[in-house]
Image: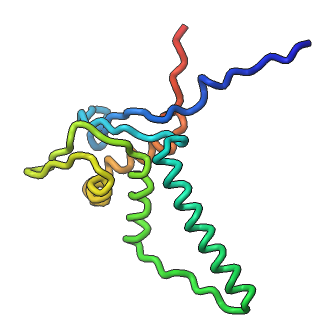
Amino acid sequence: MKDEAIDLGGIIPQDETIKEILKPGGTEGTGWMITLAGPAHPKAVAWTNEISKRNLRRQQRIEAAQVNGRKFVAEDREVDDVRRENVEWAVSRIVGWSPAVKIGAETYPFSDAVAIELLSRPSMGWAFAQIVEWIGDERSFTKASAKA
């Protein structure tokens, strides 16, 4: 029996997907469209590589301390630092948004810095939670199969 090739092309995650932010607590759309980077998107890969480098450097410091008989003192992290790092991770997966967001008299066109500032606000937790949920759901980046 001849081995046949299995085509995985239809299930490989897409590089980008577009999702609409929903109003808090509901299913009604806001019109705010977020373009998210899939796991193989260059922006997502760059973030993953940077975090891996940080972790490797930390591990090297721990090992150096152990080899030299010194006590390793872990860095003291604040809650705000962890929260900001979580927002930066999510923003590393945002390619863009449209239209620009308006809150009061202020307009927020997409940039990484603007996204970090906006999504760090406690009042924007509802939008941040949706973005994190989509990033964590592999189905967000998988093409829907054709209906028969």
Residue at 20 percent of width and 44 percent of height: 101
Q: How is the image coloured?
A: rainbow
Task: Tell me: residue 11, above or below residue 52.
Answer: above
Q: Quadrant of the C terminus?
A: top right
Specify whether 71 is left or right of 38. Answer: right
Percent across and percent down for residue 57 are 60, 72
Q: Quadrant of the N terminus?
A: top right
Task: Tell me: residue 6, above or below residue 49.
Answer: above
Instruction: Name, please, the residue furthest toward the top.
Output: 148
Residue at 38 percent of width and 33 percent of height: 18
Percent across and percent down for residue 5 are 76, 19
Residue at 49 percent of width and 39 percent of height: 38
Total label count?
Answer: 0
Q: Quadrant of residue 70?
A: bottom right
Residue at 12 percent of width and 52 percent of height: 106
Q: Quadrant of residue 24?
A: top left
Task: Tell me: residue 116, above or below residue 22.
Answer: below
Percent across and percent down for residue 98 are 25, 37
Specify whether 70 is left or right of 41. Answer: right
